[in-house]
Image: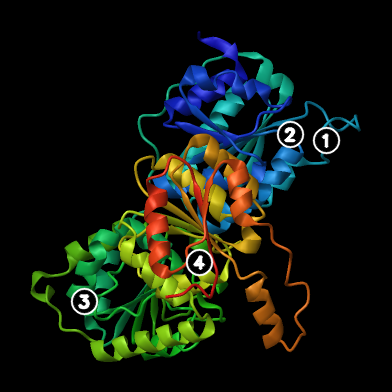
Amino acid sequence: MSRQPLGAQISQMLKDRGVDTIFGIPGVHNVELYRGIEQAGITHVLARHEQGAGFMADGYARATGKPGVAYVITGPGLTNILTPLGQAYSDSVPILTISSCLDETSARRGQLHQMRDQRAAAETVCAWSEEARTASAAYALIDRAFDQFASARKRPCHMQVSIDTLGAVADAAPQPPATRPGLPAASHDDVYDVVAAVLAAERPLFVFGGGAVAGAAAIPDLLRQTGAASIVTYAARGVVPGDAPLYFGSTLARPDSADIAAQADLVIAVGTTLSEVDLWRPTLGHTAPMIRVDIDPEVFTGMGPQDRAILADAGAFLKAMTIAIPARTADQPPKWDAATVARKRAAWRAEVDAERPGIGAVCDALRAVLPNDTMIYSDMTQFAYGAKEIWDMPRPGHWHHPYGFGTLGYALPAAIGGAVARKSQPTLAIAGDYGLQYTIQELGTAVELGLPLPILVWDNGKLGEIEDSMVRSQIAPNAVVARNPDFLALAKAYGAGAIEPGSLQDLQQAVLDAFKADTPTLIRVTPDIPG
């Protein structure tokens, strides 16, 4: 069947490029995209809202490292998925969204799903947004997206195809290229120059970001070989073992972490943008020279004359450093005081416990029983804000959060995407009572799929973080309390399990039981849960 409608050819092309799952919602405008899904052997996950489909594709991509793919309709289908695409853009997640579009919009008005400029709307939150007017253009754009995912900072892409073009018979797509372009690599001289600078420094400090996850296996040896201290962004938790003696944790957002940076005589920032949502202050706080290693040249803006920028894949660079370090330095004496580091971490933990009572105890209880390969997806909720600072992950790339864009409603659908990708491995969703209601309808998808997914709902009955912000700003709290549904009854109405543990021990058992269930389980937890 070399000639078929283009919609069917697109699904086959995606299958040939390794796509096994598509998230989306069919409609009259994109029905041709659904013609070839089953024929291609691709699984389609039916979301309840395009926002859910986008977050599912995000969760799938973060779990697998492969692109997440979503099919949506013209107009509102695309606008509904823009929030997930914005989240994926800020967090470097590869998503390919394929939408239909109207055949002609310049001379006609009042058409179903009509927008003034649909392509341009998507461009605001994507690496690119293009319209394919022919089958060959559609095939070229799909391969362009896969090339970009392989060779640059991963960001979402959008392609739209007109309704008539999707239905027109077309030749089959070309076979996948034998190879894709690779990520930029550092030169031999760059690697050896950085090694020399780190070994010459009295107090080197590594700052690892999410881009360092790919090189996590090399990091423990690198720290031992150099005697350097380390601190990580939230996205990089797990790249440094939690018990490493010179590890300051995921505490960049603590205001006095600037004092730590100021003590360093060399800072090596690897795979991190050092953005506002990493630091919550204008600068890291260092005065020493900084070496930045990143695949995105944008992050080098504003560097000083004493700094050095290296455009390279962070993971490969870290591995190269451990190889380049001379054997005689394999047991470099620590250049920071481990006792001082431990005291600082203990003080920061006490601060988090005081700022967010009850969260630390729940974190400790969960961390004690969760399997090491548990993948966690969290929402914008106070529980996650506290956990990100005190929960040392046993492995990298296993806690996902809407960091940059900061959207509510992420956790549940993203966890569904992750659970679909990791069928035999444990996945946990953590959401607040308010954020859960943005995408609660996706519980229907989780039930439909029979996912053994525990959904922990941190229910403080209000927008707690916003209330605290108002109080700090000397504003009388306003519009921060909303009537919640009976979450347990709502979950049962969808066909899910539901439980409210009476103690931390009961919570531990509830989560473990949920991993073994044949349906998702909503677990309601309040800040006053007994220990």
* Distance CA(mark 3)–CA(mark 4): 25 Å
> Which of 28/215 is in front?
28
* Distance CA(mark 2)–CA(mark 4): 34 Å
Q: Residue at x 43, y 22 (%)?
A: 175
Residue for badge 1 = 114
> Which of 46/20 is in front?
46
Q: Is residue 85 visible?
A: no
Residue for badge 2 = 74
Q: Are marks 1 and 3 in contact (CB under 8 Å)?
A: no
* Distance CA(mark 4)–CA(mark 1): 37 Å
Residue for badge 3 = 226
Q: Residue furthest front?
A: 502
Q: Are marks 2 and 1 in contact (CB under 8 Å)?
A: yes
> Which of 480/483 is in front?
483
**x and y percent of residue 410 in the render?**
58, 54
Of the two numbered discs 2 and 3 on the same chain, state the one appearing first in sequence: 2
Crowding at mark 2 (Cα within 10 Å: few <14, some 14-19, many 20+): many
Q: Amino acid at mark 3?
A: Thr
Q: Residue at x 48, y 20 (%)?
A: 40
Q: Amino acid at mark 2?
A: Thr
Report the mark closest to the observer, 2 or 4: 2
Residue for badge 4 = 299
